[in-house]
Structures are given as C-alpha cells and as structure tokens.
Amino acid sequence: MSLNQAEVIVAGHICLDIIPTIPNRNVSTDALLVPGKLVDIGEAIISTGGAVSNTGIALHRLGSPVKLMGKIGNDLFGKAIIDVLESHSPLLAEGMIVAEGEASSYSIVISPPGVDRIFLHCTGTNDTYSAKDISFEQLDSAKLFHFGYPPLMRCMYENEGEGLVDLLRQAKERGVTVSLDMAKPDPESPAGQVHWRTILNKALPHVDIFLPSFEEILYMLYPEVYTSFIERAGSNDILHLVDGSILSMISDDLLAMGAAVVGLKLGEHGLYVRTSPNANAIAGMGRCAPEEANIQAWCNQELLANCYQVKVAGTTGAGDCTIAGFLAAMLRGVTIEEALRFAVGVGACNVEKSDATSGVPTWDEVQARINEGWDHRSLTLSLPSWRAIGAGLWAESGREEGNRDE
C-alpha cells in the first residue's frame, strides 16, 4: 500500500517513549521522586509516543489503512522510532521525515500502577515541523487527516499559530475530514505563555472534529478557572471537579469558534461529546461526514460515555487511543452513541497494558467485548440535568429532549 491508498493520515508530534517498569508499591509519585533516593525498578519499555504514533498505531490495530507523517532526527532515538513503527508494519514508516542534524524527540514516562503519569519531555524535531513537511497531495484520496499536539511543536504555536492555521487550512481544502488533538504545555515554557484562545479562534474554522482533554482546554481557554480548580483540588488531579455546566460552557465556545464536533477526554470519567446544532456544519465535515440520512441524528447532541471497568496497568496513550476509537467509528459510519461507546472501549483496552498501544485489539474484539455486556464504571461527576439513555451513556436532558421533539 502506498501513501495515496491510505484511508487515514496522522500527522504532527512523534517521540520515543522510555517507560521504566515501576512495581505497585501503593505510594505516590512524590514519594518515589525524592532527591538522593535510589528506587529499585524493573526493565524499561521502549515504545513510540505522541499523537502520530499513538493514534496512528491504534487506528492501524483497529483495521484502518494508516500512514504517518512525523519528523525525526538521524540519531539513535530516531532509528529506534523507525524500528518500532516497522515492527507494526513497514508501511507505517513510509511517510516519516528524517531531518539531518536535528535531535529526535523523546519522553521519559513515569507511570506507577494506578497513578496518572508524569512526562519528562524533549520536543526535538517536532519544533521545526511545519506545513512544508506535509505531502498535501496525499490527502486527496484519504478520508481523514488527524493532526496532534501542536502545543509541543514550536512552529505550530509561534506567531499566533500562523503555522498551524496554514496547515489545517490546506488540509481542509483537500476535502478530508480534519481532526485535531492537543497537549497541555508546560506553563513555564514558551508554549505555555501564548494566547491559545486567539490561536484556536483562527484554527478551528478549519477543523471538523476537535478532541482535547478537559485539562488542556481549560488551561488554554480559561487559565483563571484552571488555577482555581488546582487550588480547590489541592493537586493537578482536577477531573473529579468537572460538572455539566463547565462542559457545556467549554463546548459552547469551541463550537462557536468553528468545530462541528467537540470531544473532551475526561480520563477515568469517560468521554464527553457535543455536536453543532447546524446540519450544514455536520454535512460539511469532509469525507467522514455522516451519511445524509444520519446527519440530523448527529446534530445538537450532548453526550457522555462512562469508562469500562478494567484493571489499569498504565495510562500512557489512553487519550490518544480513545481518539483512535472515536475516529475509527466515524470512518465506519456508526451512530454517535456507538462511536462514544467504542471510543471508551478502546481507551479501556489500552490501559490494560503499560505502554501506549499494545493493549489495543482489533475492531471486532472491542465490539465483542462491548456486546457481551462489559461493565461500566459508575458515574461520579455532577450532572444534575443529565439522564441515562443506555448502558454507560448519558445525555443532557434538555438537549436530548429537544432533538427527539424535532
């Protein structure tokens, strides 16, 4: 299969993940990372990370023909990235760009069992990635173009996001469905200091499906609210403070900026999705738009899918794999309810392994597990105006009733 036969092209950030195996000691990361302390750990898992690798490989494992467009250096880490990609399929490495004299990106992932991970990250070649690195003609026969992690790519966020806007605009002009994922930058870094609301106002008119995490987008759009959440929680773990009103507020803003479908990853609490009330916006989503008969069913939806119950080995790549599940479902033309359930199903399978993608099975295997009555986690978020509409699936009552009345 050559690049022009790919159904999905995944572009943007890629890195090498070095994941030390940490025994389950029922201690916090603060207790592990003590200056001068020697911590006895296991062997390191070496895998690729970043949106290009995580979402791309997950889509490949789910059965979608995928090509990757990432950028690496001609160094040991870059060669390791190619080796990992080729171990999944030689075709996955075909679109990779090798930049002479530049350092490949890498992360050291501190991921104790049952605890959210910490990343020590070098952006490397991702900082020089630009629209010039995209073979846009390869998008002409693809259905979906997914771009990930612009906050970790300097050329994407500098000059008020000029590079990101140009890249997304050119992709959208090719007729593909454009999907965008984010990453939370270090607040002390240049990416953490830019005005992300300005960038998103310019970028989202060229985006069909926008899939950030709750923490990322809260930090980017409402930094004061983000700080207040941190203060209330007493830590960076703020997801238990999420409620229906703030989810609606964020999605209102993002839909107004131009996205047709907004998904907010909520970690162990699941996936929230809100869609445009404008049928033309849904119909204009490119080659992955719902069929004409199903467009109305995708309009003006506000849904949340609970996570499935699993034994968590590690959370690395969970959000990227959840995205892969949602995009794979859209590629297959399923209902929005089925897309949410499948997305959280893929995310749940992922966290049963400690690395970013090896837990992802085939499409049929995920579907079989769901159909067999896979138990959901309990809903613990405050959603007073929502109601259950099926196993593990919730809808904002006023919006759901409004759709039904139509």
Image (cartoon, rainbow, N blue to C red):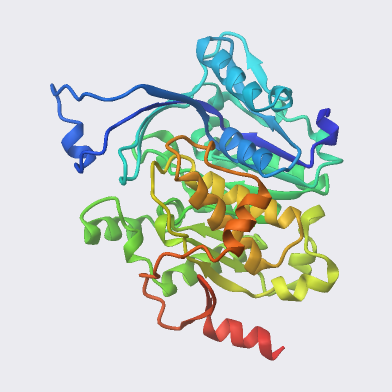
What is the x, y in percent for residue 321? 55, 46
Residue farthest toward the bottom in the current orientation of the protein: 405
Residue farthest toward the left in the current orientation of the protein: 36
Question: Camera-side residue: 264 or 224?
Answer: 264
Question: Camera-side residue: 114 or 174?
Answer: 114
Say whether residue 203 is visible. no
Q: Is residue 8 above or below residue 255?
A: above
Name the quadrant of the C terminus.
Answer: bottom right
Tell whether 379 sits left or right of 61. Answer: left
Residue farthest toward the front in the current orientation of the protein: 372
Q: Residue at x 72, y 75 (%)?
A: 297
Name the quadrant of the N terminus.
Answer: top right
Q: Residue at x 54, y 39 (%)?
A: 149
Q: Residue at x 39, y 41 (%)?
A: 314
What is the x, y in percent for residue 173? 81, 46
Q: How many marks?
A: 0
Say whether residue 174 is visible. yes
Tell whether 161 sits left or right of 171. Answer: left
Question: Camera-side residue: 40 or 14?
Answer: 40
What is the x, y in percent for residue 350? 50, 45
What is the x, y in percent for residue 20? 35, 26
Q: Is residue 180 above or below residue 354?
A: below
